[in-house]
């Protein structure tokens, strides 16, 4: 399923995105909490699927009585656990997990849904997410680009210095059919160790809006696309019937 961050980059990823200009996990989490409460005012529990290093959960734990996380990468969970004492963090694949309980809300952020594979996998994933929702529960997904919005051969780059450590991230994303392959180069340098270079590849699928809609509906959920305050990707929000 795409690429799982390893132990050599999980902590770098965590530090980089928390400090990246314009990125606020806290603001994103509060906005998601508002969307949930608009549709289910008494929502008390939330599951963050593909929770990564737990940066959204750090705020969501203040918004809901009970929260939990699911993440495929053990290295990501190793970073998250010390930051979220007492929060259940499960290792699992969003396409076939079963936690044996339901939540008032399930969220999947940072375009992680793009890693699932093909449309059949998308439907299976949405079915698993919806199966973990109470009736009337709210599902929030931040999608990846669609075939009509993706910019082929896109290059992005940022350099940050955090507590004496300089982190450079440069990515190049290329389309092949309905898939995108993002190659990410990390260079991390500090005075003691000098520069270290790591390359990772991520494969994400460009799903048409109709594919998302069909997957939500097959899972027994309504769906609407809303504008996102932080991204042109928007947000998909549904309610389980």
Image (tube, helix red, strand yellow):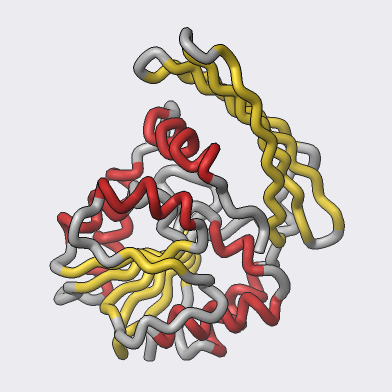
Q: Identify the image quadrant of residue 21.
A: top left
Q: Residue at x 37, y 46 (%)?
A: 79
Q: Is residue 150 left or right of residue 195?
A: right
Task: Residue at 23% x, 62% y: name it.
Answer: 87
Which residue is painted at 74% across and 36% down in the image? Answer: 172
User: In the image, what residue occupies the spot 39% across and 50% down?
Assistant: 78
Query: In terms of image quadrants, where is residue 155?
Result: top right
Image coords of residue 112 (percent x, y): 54, 58
Rendered view: 88 above or below 163: below
Quarter holding the C terminus is bottom left
Is 104 placed above or below 170 here? below
Q: Single out the residue that lies furthest toward the top.
A: 191
- Decide: is 11 above or below 84: above
List x then y, in percent, for residue 122. 62, 76
The N terminus appears in which quarter of the rendering? bottom right
* Residue reaching furthest to the right: 177
Q: Is residue 63 left or right of residue 189?
A: left
Position of 61 with respect to 233 (left or right) is left
Of 129 and 154, the residue lying toward us? 129
Indicate the quadrant where residue 40 lies: bottom left
Horizontal and vertical percent position of residue 50 = 46, 61
Q: Is residue 218 visible?
A: yes
Reply above or below: 120 against 169.
below
């Amino acid at each position: 399923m795409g690429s799982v961050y390893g132990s050599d980059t999980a902590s770098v990823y965590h530090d980089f995105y928390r400090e990246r200009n314009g990125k606020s996990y806290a603001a994103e989490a509060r906005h998601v909490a508002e969307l949930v409460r608009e549709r289910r005012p008494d929502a008390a529990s939330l599951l963050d699927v593909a929770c990564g290093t737990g940066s959204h959960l750090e705020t969501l734990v203040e918004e809901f009585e009970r929260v939990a996380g699911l993440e495929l990468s053990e290295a990501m969970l190793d970073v998250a656990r010390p930051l979220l004492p007492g929060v259940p963090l499960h290792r699992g694949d969003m396409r076939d997990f079963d936690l044996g309980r339901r939540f008032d809300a399930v969220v999947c952020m940072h375009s992680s849904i793009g890693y699932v594979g093909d449309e059949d996998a998308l439907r299976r994933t949405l079915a698993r997410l919806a199966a973990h929702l109470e009736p009337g529960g709210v599902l929030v997904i931040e999608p990846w680009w669609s075939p009509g919005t993706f910019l082929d051969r896109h290059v992005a780059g940022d350099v940050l210095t955090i507590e004496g450590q300089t982190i450079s991230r440069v990515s190049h994303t290329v389309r092949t059919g309905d898939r995108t392959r993002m190659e990410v180069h990390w260079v991390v340098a500090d005075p003691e160790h000098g520069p270290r270079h790591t390359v990772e590849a991520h494969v994400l699928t460009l799903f048409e809006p109709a594919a998302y809609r069909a997957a939500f509906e097959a899972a027994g959920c309504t769906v609407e696309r809303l504008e996102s305050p932080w991204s042109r990707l928007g947000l998909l929000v549904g309610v389980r019937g």
